[in-house]
Every structure is written in structure tokens, then in C-alpha cells.
Amino acid sequence: MATIPIPSSSSRFIFRPRPKTLNPALFSRHTPPKAPPFSVLIRALSAQAVAAAPAAEISDNQVVKPQWKAAIDFKWIRDNKEAVAANIKNRNSNANLEIVLGLYDKMLNLQKEVERLRGERNNVANKMKGKLEPSERQKLVEEGKNLKEALTTLEEDLINLRDELQLEAQCIPNMTHPDVPIGGEDSSKLRNMVGSPLSFNFPVKDHLQIGKDLDLFDFDSAAEVSGSKFYYLKNEAVMLEMALVNWTLTQVRKKGFTPLTTPEIVRSSVVEKCGFQPRGENTQVYSIEDTDQCLIGTAEIPVGGIHMDSIVSESSLPIKYVAFSHCFRTEAGAAGTATRGLYRVHQFSKVEMFILCKQEESDMYHEELIKIEEDLFSSLGLHYKTLDMATGDLGAPAYRKFDVEAWMPGLERYGEISSASNCTDYQSRRLGIRYRPLESPSTTSKKGKTNQAATKFVHTLNATACAVPRLLLYILNLDKKKEGIGPMEKAIARFHSRTCLT
Amino acid sequence: MALQCRLSGTTIQTLKMARIPIPSSSSRFIFRTRPKTLNSALFSRHTPPKAHPFSVLIRALSAQALAAAPAAEISDNQVVKPQWKAAIDFKWIRDNKEAVAANIKNRNSNANLEIVLGLYDKMLNLQKEVERLRGERNNVANKMKGKLEPSERQKLVEEGKNLKEALTTLEEDLINLRDELQLEAQCIPNMTHPDVPIGGEDSSKLRNMVGSPFSFDFPVKDHLQIGKELDLFDFDSAAEVSGSKFYYLKNEAVMLEMALVNWTLTQVRKKGFTPLTTPEIVRSSVVEKCGFQPRGENTQVYSIEDSDQCLIGTAEIPVGGIHMDSIVSESSLPIKYVAFSHCFRTEAGAAGTATRGLYRVHQFSKVEMFILCKQEESDMYHEELIKIEEDLFSSLGLHYKTLDMATGDLGAPAYRKFDVEAWMPGLERYGEISSASNCTDYQSRRLGIRYRPSESPSTTSKKGKTNQAATKFVHTLNATACAVPRMLIKRKRDWSWKKLLLDSTVEHV
């Protein structure tokens, strides 16, 4: 794979692919050294959207088997193929709709054929029940045998076809909200701006220098112990990180979110079902040796997995979680000035919000999440802008995505500090999370037979409430004279006074 | 020279390590080896699938102290090369060999002192021989400077060539010998404090007891049941998402964990410790230098695929690495850190009732204290650490006892180890909640952490020449200040939790 130039925006921090140009050279069947069947790509984690084919063992004449299946609505795709095709194009996705539709038709036909043959075989079996001449019987036995063989072959083919269809279809990105601007990064639309860019009339020190001077963090020792892009936080920075996490969890909890801490090691299949690709080249995901486990890059993954393969009652929705975890990212391929010090690290603390809700309510909860984020950042005294990200900048799972970028005085530009995505049913169709709508009076039916409403897939949303250490960076550069009455402002004021930042 | 690596007299075999029965005590929670019986079948050269040279065992992480041989690529006639070298004082070992031998025996260690001493002598002799040959080669070179008959010159050239060849071979042998010596010697455990009781787990001595065992006059529920009823943690979903022994903390348990960590960091900071958070991914060589074995079978250590990195099982490792390969000034000592991190342990081989729910998990939060100090002060700081721990646990209202662990229960790095066991009402027995070890210079000789003593007036010397005192190795100590989630288990019913929460929230946000 050619090295992909990384755009200077720090969107990748929030662990989404940034599809740019379609490059067929980037199609790769990546065969890892290990034997277990890997499941299909969901979303490439390099700067371009590569619909990487499933990494798996491929024997001669054998179709790769997906490790798990997404409950994809093929009929809907076929009935809306123009919209789906346009969406694929707008998102610069490598999904191949023609192949999917072709396979789907083929599969439907094969299914009919299989049913037909089964019917014939039943006929033969029935005929053989009656009295027959030996020669007749022999003919039927032959016919039965031929039918059985043909059936076995076709049934195998059907299985392979379904697998192939699944693999191709899993590449298809989520549909897009009609208000989302179409285009690349520059087409993203401004939703909101709070405050204005700060400048100082003295040269702003590089944060790494400040960190050394005030003994707040240590990258040098960490480079020896662990490698580059690792760090120790020290002294007041430690207390500030704890205060930030504590405060964020408390604020969000007040809004009805259930606090959680999560496992940071998860099965790779869960990573894939959420829309990430653990085993591609340039993957963002660390894998654990000799296991099918990975380190999480965001708490979205273990939280998404909580209700995997289950049906929740409608009355339990919405389910709202606010989860604190450490996050681990390889940052493979990241380079340049947007990667020094705290801007791009392999390990960091993050508080993440996650909502499961009814289909018709996800837009509303998306607005709720972005409002919560904006309230948090305003309380912290940040100057920031909120963007409605354009189609070229959405990851495969996101129906719509709002990014918050804060002004970074040291770099004299904006940098992403959070992201709020509405994934509608993309993740839930893969994770298998459904709800049973409450019965309405009109569905009570025929005498004696309970008519349960068919289950639907929940919609899932996720949003960053707090990603240390970029927030540390902003706080380092905040207006130091600001004194407020809120607990976070007090904590920040204390931080500044103890670190003697004047 | 074809080297045959001898381990206790047995030649190399590729053996699978037998399953080691795990004692029911929860000491393993604190990530130390528990040497029990010496079993030669357990010697194994573990050759991992990867190509890069692995370094030598330091300490097995199964219930028995296995001086596992280095995992490395072994080519024909090639000695395994240690990936890094410990600054071992061979001369001291030789001069104190009875004491070293007794110590090895008391600790049920598989280190082979005879081999080490044999190799050391061999090495000294070989060194002498090399020096002798070098001397002769210099002579020859000098002779060739003068005027000589052609036949004489030719003879000298021949001689010089022979000497050079012999020297090259011997120098190679010397390198191999040094490597072999290093590998064998790294297995030798730390010496032991004279007051440490000799024997197995049962010989550990009681130092202190605070409070007394209590029970409730109603049946005590299993903590997993309580957790479900109060919606405090979820093991079931985590088993699907991650595997067994993983969990989510929920609701009050989350706030409680944060309060505990916050409070502990604050308390210890007041005593002059520098707060830290650490990387949780480290190079495997650092893990080894601290005395752990990342790549043995039944290892406690998770490794990252396609890298030389591992997940930490304790913050002791990344903190120990901060001053790796450096010389600190004496005036900077003692250096005291209190570090918060998540810890990851495979718990390979752990089974039984002492492993349900929160008692044995793959991932947990921990606050760890670490001290680097002068050699003569480590005993004093060991006492300081255990005192801090006892104060913390008393403040938390725990009933506990402090033990001076016996020789059979010390890991290879520890000179002395105090364990604190708290009373667990649900299980009606004591369970380990913390451990404080004085590792003296075991880790620092491997991590390469030294200090330069301040000059005393008597060392100012000859005119114009600065006489710096020779460097010494620091002593390192580590102690658990707070290991969630076992702390959560014990305190479910105590109202003091509310006060703790309140104190922490008010103080720190």
C-alpha cells in the first residue's frame, strides 16, 4: 500500500477514516500471517476510505467466510439503488453496488432453484411411497439421487453466494442525512461558533517546552520505556486530568446518563461490528498476540457491545451511557506537525457518551449530544466552533457527524477535540441490537394468537464528552486570569496558580 | 565451540511447562512469583514463534519460581545472546558463595550457582589468556619494526598471523562466555534481609494487626449477586464483549473508584510523592529488567502483536524505567513517585474460588508508590512505605494484618516483602490487598540506575585531577497504595464510603 499523505486536520484523532480520492491501488486483500478467518472490512482506518476486502485465508475455490453477519436489508438497497449509488459516490466509498445487486439477484434465483429442486425431490419421494414396477422404482431412485446431488451442490453454492454477498454488502456505507453538505473536508458547514481566536502579544511557547519547564509531562523517558508518542503526566497535570474526568462524568450523569468504566481489551469481532477495521495495514488498532483480542481506541466499542445480540424493550429506550476509559491508537501513518507532543499520542483518557434509542428519535438525540458537548466546552472556557461534517468526511457508520474544533493558540489554528455521530442502524445491524415496539391496540389479533410487533433495530449515537490530553493543552493556554464560581473553573484556577503560569 | 547449555545438569530439551497448581491464597494478585518445589521437568527453553532474540528470564510468573532459560533463537553452535545485560557483581558472589547458595536454597530458586562460579572462573582465565596473547602479538609487532633478515621477518609474520587467528577465536569465545555467564547469573535471586523468616507461605511472620475479623448476623451475599442487584457492575456483558474476568463498573461503583484513586493520590502526595500517570504499553525489555518474564508459558503479561511491546501488570514497570540507564545526583535522592495506571494481567493458570468476580480480573486500576534511594536508606523507606499503606487502610476502616513474607514467598527481586491482607466478610478469610517490596539493587542493576555520591573532602586529590567518587546503584522499592477493585469488595456495607466520596468530590473538583 502506498503511504497515504495525512491531511493536516486532526480529524483522525477521533478515530474515523477520512475518505479522499478513490485509488484502486489501495484495494488489497490483506492476508495476515494468522490462520483464523477474519471478517470483512467495515471501514478502513487510513486516510482514505478503502473498502479493504476481508482479510482471511483463501483456499482454492473457496469463498472467504465472514466471521459474523450484518443484518443488511438487501431488498431496501435494491429498491433504492439510485440513492444508495449516489451516497456511495458522495462518500468516496469503494463499495461496489453493482456487484452487490448482481449477487443479490443471483442469490434470489439460486434460492428459487433450490426450492424448486426440493419440491421435485419431495415429489419423487412421494411417488416412491406407492406401488411401483421395479424398473420404475429404479428410475425414480436414480432421479432422486441425481436431484440430491444437484441439490447439495446448489445449496453449497447458495451458502458461498450468501457469504460473498455479505462481504461485498458490508462495505456499503450508511445513508446520509439530507442536510449534510456534499463534498470534501472544506465543504463542512459551520453550525455554531463560541468565542473568538485568542492571540497573545508575546511569543507562545511550544507546549512541550511549557510541560518541561513546569514539570507537567515527560515524553523523553516514555520514549525510552515505551516508544515515541507515549508520555507520563506529572504533578498538577495528573490532578487536572482526574478533575476533568470526574467533573465531566458528574455533569453528564446529571443529564440521565449511566456512568461506566469499560474493559479496554475486547474481541476483534466487536471492533469490526462497530465499524472499525482491526487488521488492515495502517490500522489504528493494537492487537494482542496469540488471541482474537484488541485494545480499544474508544469506549464506543465496549459500550456498543453491551447489548449485542439482544432485544431490548421499547420502554427501556433511550439507554444512555457515559463511559470513562483509556484509549489506545497506533496512529499508523500519522506524521507532521500535527503530531507532536500531546496532539497525537498512543494512549489517552476519554469520557464518551453513547445512546441507544428508537429509530425516529435519533436526530433528536444527536442534537441533545452536541448541545451537551457545547455546554461542557463553554463551561471550560474554550473558544470553539461546531461543524456539520461533509459527506467526504464521514466514516462508514455515520449518518451524520458534528465535529467540535477548538482554537489552539500554540499552533494558531483549530484542532478537533470532539465528534458526535448518529450511526442510525449501521452498528445495530452488525451488533444485533433490536427492540420490540409496544403493541398498539390495532395489532391485537385473531382469537388466541398473540401478535407481537416485529422487532426493529435500535439507532446508536456516540459523542466525545472529554478527551484528555488535548484539553490539557487548551487549558494550559487559557486566559489565566479567569476566575469563576463553577467547580471546573476553580480547578483550573488552582491548576494555574500551582503551576505558576502567569 | 559447540556450547551445550546446562541447566542443573540437564541438557536442553524443548519441554512444555507442566501445569502448575495454584495455591488458594491470593498472593498472586500482586504479581510475584511464589516459588514452591523445584521441579526439573519445568525447565524449558521456550522458543517463541518470533525471530528476534528474547532476553533472559528474570522471574517466572507462575506459582513456582522457574529460572526459565532465555527465550531466543538458537542457531547451531551459537550461544543465545541476552538482549540486555545486568550489572552483576560476580566477584561479590564468588566471595560470598556460601551465603548466596543458602539464599538460593531458601528461596527455592532454580539458579545454579556452581555453573555461574564455574563460568566466572573460566571467563577470568580466558581473559588472562587473551591479554597474554595480545601482549605477545604486541611483542611481535614491535620486533618487526627493527631491521631483520628476510627469513626472520617471514617467521615473525607467520607468528603474528597465528597469534591473530588464535586471538580472534579466543575473543569470540570470551564474548560467548560472557553471554552465557550473564544468562545464568541473571537467574540468581536477590539476597534476603536477615530478619525475614525462612520457609514457605506459612512461615510468614505477623507484623501488625488492626481491627478484628467481623461477620454479619445475616447471611452475607456473594458480591456478584450484590453487584447485580445494585447495578454496580456487569460481568455478563463483558464476557461476551471481551471474555471472562472482564467487567464494567456502573453507577456508584464508578464514582467510588474515582474517589478512591483521587483520595489515595492526594494523601500520598502530601507525603512528598510526585503524582504520575504512566504509559500502559512498554517495551518488553523493561518488563524483564524489573524482574518479570513476559514470554514464558503461563506468563502474566499480555504482548502486543508484531511489536516488542507489552501491557503493564503494574505501574512499577513504567516508573522503574523512568531513570533507566542514567546517573542521578545523590542530592536528588530519595526520588518518590505515586503513580496511577490501569493494570493488565493474563492470570494464566489461575482457577478456583479465589478467582470469581472482582477477586481476579484481567484489568484493574491501581495506585502504586515507588522510591529510588541511597543504599543505606532502603530499610528505612521500606518501613515508611508500609506505614503509609497501613495509615491509608486504617483511614478506610479496614480490618487487616501485615505480614513479613517468608523466603519461599519472595519474588526474585525482593530483598524483603510486607504483604497486607484484609478481612473479607463474604469469604470469611483474609485476602491480599497490597504488597511492599524492597528490591535493593536487583532492579537498578538491570535498569542501569546509579547515583554519584557527593564528594567528601578526603577525596579531593592530586593537583589538577578531579577525583569523582565511583557511582553506586540506587535501591528501589515499590508498594501498592490502592488496588481497585478489591477495595470495592470489602467496603460494600460501610457507611464511611459516603464520607469518602464527599471528601474527594469536594476537595478535588
Image (cartoon, coloured by chain):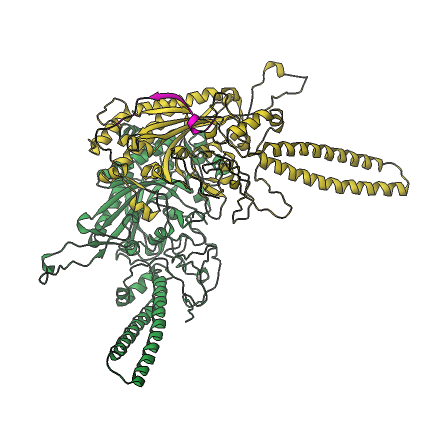
Chain colours: A yellow, B green
Above or below, A390 relative to B5: above
Asked whether B340 or A397 is in front, the reply is A397
Choose top left, top right, bottom left or bottom right for residue A204: top left
Report the label total.
0
Let me know if residue B285 appears in the view: yes
Determine the residue located farthest toward the right in the rendered image. Answer: A133
**Magenta segment includes A189:** yes
Which x, y percent locates residue A22? 51, 35
Q: Position of residue B127 (x, y in %)?
A: 30, 71
Residue nearest the observer in this picture, B230 or B295: B295
Say whether residue A429 is left or right of residue A486: right
Q: Is residue B437 left or right of residue A18?
A: left
Quadrant assignment for the C terminus of chain A: top left
Magenta-highlighted residues: A182-200
Measured from the top left, where is residue A195 in percent x and y? Answer: 30, 22
Residue in the image at 27% along x and 62% along y: B89
Name above or below for residue B429 compared with residue A358.
below
Q: Is residue B500 visible?
A: no
Could you say which quadrant of the image residue B44 lies in? bottom left
The picture places residue B256, in percent across and down from the top left corner, at 35, 32
- Find residue B186 and report its image quarter: bottom left
Against A149, residue B298 (above or below) is below
Residue B387 part of the magenta segment: no
In the displayed image of the protein, which residue is found farthest to the top? Answer: A441
Considering depth in this image, is A12 or A438 the residue closer to the camera?
A12
